[in-house]
Image: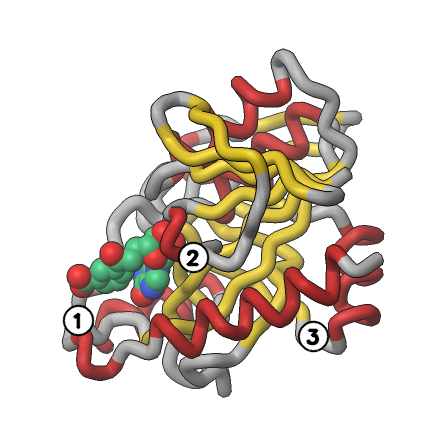
């Protein structure tokens, strides 16, 4: 049984099931999955997963959604990727959290600062089944508002795409002991606010195709 999550219901219009409400947002009980709309941003993503997992067994969770492609990533609108590692880039100072001398999470002797892995085994299994690249994602609650800003972030953190939830989801999965994976479809060039350059419909169609293959077993 999958727990499927997306920041907005607009990113998963293709899912069908018995509707319910969770934290005031959309939920669905479908064949082989439960779906939750989390809301945009880090806190919403982590909160939704944690509060659901507090009263429901979660075997494996997939965060799916749209994302912005960083310059130089080779990613274009409509492309679909898995995220193997997320950078929480608005935690600490510009160079990261380690400069403050505190870790964000510690587990089995490992200290995590700004980088949080998705589940390696689950991600590699999905990459094989779906024939997808695995990239590094960058998460901030602020979106890049210029190509210069996007390029600086991509360079500083060696990331391929930008979103607003991934690192929080990855860190919550680590803390909760949940196998988590992240599927992102590129909707736009990061840093480009002109919606004429956005291809949300194509991105959602790519998500639909991948999720259908995932659920067919
Ligand atoms: O109005 C803008 O300039 C603008 C720029 C980036 C994203 C938005 C959104 O409202 C979408 C946020 C939503 O979608 C994900 N997303 C998609 N593209 C990006 C991006 O370039 N940078 C950050 N997040 C992006 C994000 O995960 C949210 O769920 C508006």
Q: How is the image coloured?
A: secondary structure
Q: Which residue is drawn at 58% across and 31% down?
A: 172
Figure quadrant of the C terminus: bottom right
Mark 3 or mark 1, earlier in chain? 3
Q: Is residue 27 visible?
A: yes
Q: CA–CA distance between discs 3 and 1?
A: 27 Å
Residue 66, percent from left and from top: 43, 62
Q: Tag 3: Cα neighbours inside 10 Å, few (<14), some, or many (≥20)?
A: some
Mark 1: secondary structure: loop
* Beta carbon of the mark 2 residue lies under 8 A of ligand 1: yes
Residue located at (54% from left, 73% from top)? 206
- Cα distance between the residues tagged 2 and 1: 19 Å
Tag 3–tag 2 contact (CB < 8 Å): no
Dot 2 corresponds to which residue?
A: 11
What's the residue at 67%, 32% (across, down)?
Answer: 174
198 sits left or right of 180 in the view: left
Q: Where is residue 154 in the image (x, y as percent from the top left)?
A: 41, 69
Q: Does the residue labelled 1 lie within 8 Å of ligand 1?
A: yes
Q: Callout 3: helix, strand or loop?
A: loop
Residue 118 on image: x %, y % = 67, 48
Horizontal arrangement in the rendering, residue 204 relative to residue 181 (left or right): left
Q: Looking at the rendering, which quadrant does residue 43 occupy?
A: top left
Query: Is the Cβ of the residue at disc 3 closer than 8 Å to that at disc 1?
Result: no
Label disc, if present, on residue 170 of the rendered structure = none
| Image quarter (top left, top right, bottom left or bottom right) of the N terminus | top right
Task: Write down the residue under mark 1.
Answer: 193
- Residue under numbered circle 3: 132
Disc on the earlier residue, 2 or 1? 2
């Amino acid at each position: 049984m999958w727990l499927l999550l997306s920041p907005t219901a607009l990113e998963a219009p293709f899912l069908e099931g018995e509707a319910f409400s969770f934290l005031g947002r959309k939920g669905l009980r479908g064949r082989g999955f439960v779906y939750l709309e989390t809301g945009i941003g880090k806190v919403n993503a982590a909160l939704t997963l944690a509060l659901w997992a507090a009263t429901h067994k979660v075997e494996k969770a997939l965060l799916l959604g749209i994302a912005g492609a960083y310059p130089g990533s080779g990613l274009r609108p409509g492309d679909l990727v898995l995220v193997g590692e997320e950078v929480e880039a608005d935690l600490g100072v510009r160079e990261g959290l380690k400069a403050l001398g505190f870790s964000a999470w510690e587990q089995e002797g490992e200290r995590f600062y700004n980088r949080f892995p998705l589940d390696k085994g689950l991600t590699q299994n999905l990459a094989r089944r779906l024939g997808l690249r695995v990239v590094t994602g960058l998460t901030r609650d602020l979106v890049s508002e210029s190509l210069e800003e996007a390029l600086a972030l991509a360079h500083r953190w060696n990331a391929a795409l930008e979103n607003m939830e991934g690192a929080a989801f990855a860190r919550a999965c680590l803390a909760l002991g949940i196998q988590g994976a992240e599927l992102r479809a590129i909707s736009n060039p990061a840093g480009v606010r002109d919606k004429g350059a956005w291809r949300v419909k194509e991105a959602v169609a790519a998500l639909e195709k991948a999720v259908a293959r995932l659920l067919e077993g």
